[in-house]
Image (tube, rainbow, N blue to C red):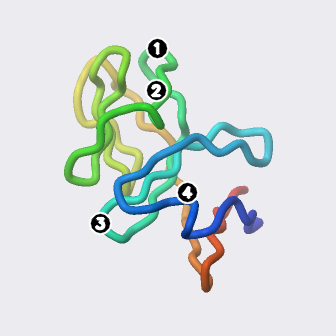
Amino acid sequence: MALHKVATTKDFPPGSAREIRVAGRSIAVFSVEGTIHAIDNECTHDGGPLSEGVVSDACVICPWHGAEFDLRTGKALTPPAVEDVRSYRVVVSGDDISLEID
């Protein structure tokens, strides 16, 4: 596993989300109530961009068809998605945000 610096904490004020491209992957990074979460950006149902979804209670709702995923684990919580997305360990060191990617 390798750590990849992807941003700084200043890039992610509370409530923000955006896509980060790193190690050939599209990853959705979210700042929720002081915690940074990272999951694959592509919904497992139809490829919707999760970084553009609505966040509520540490979950994101896909903007295309409404599938909901847990930001902490990547678990698919509601149909139409039945497969989980990958979640990534986030390391915050000082102002640096890094993701652990295998």
Q: Which residue is mark 4?
A: 88
**Front in this rendered view, residue 80 or 62:** 62
Give, as a three-letter code, the residue at label 4.
Answer: Tyr
Q: Are marks 3 and 4 in contact (CB under 8 Å)?
A: no
Q: Quadrant of residue 37?
A: bottom left
Q: Are marks 1 and 2 in contact (CB under 8 Å)?
A: yes
Secondary structure beneath disc 4? strand
Q: Quadrant of the N terminus?
A: bottom right
Secondary structure beneath disc 3? loop
C-alpha span from label 4 to label 2? 15 Å
Query: Which residue lies at the image location 34% right of the left edge and 60% below the top edge?
Result: 32
Q: Left of 27 or right of it: where is 61?
A: left
State the image coordinates of residue 96 (x, y, percent, origin top left).
Answer: 65, 74
Q: Quadrant of the C terminus?
A: bottom right
Give, as a three-letter code, the residue at label 3.
Answer: Glu
Earlier residue among tags 3 and 2? 3
Give, as a three-letter code, the residue at label 2.
Answer: Cys
Check the image and report above or below for 4 versus 50.
below
Marks 1, 3: nearer the viewer = 3
Q: Which residue is mark 3?
A: 33
Q: Left of 3 or right of it: where is 8?
A: left
Q: Which residue is mark 1?
A: 46
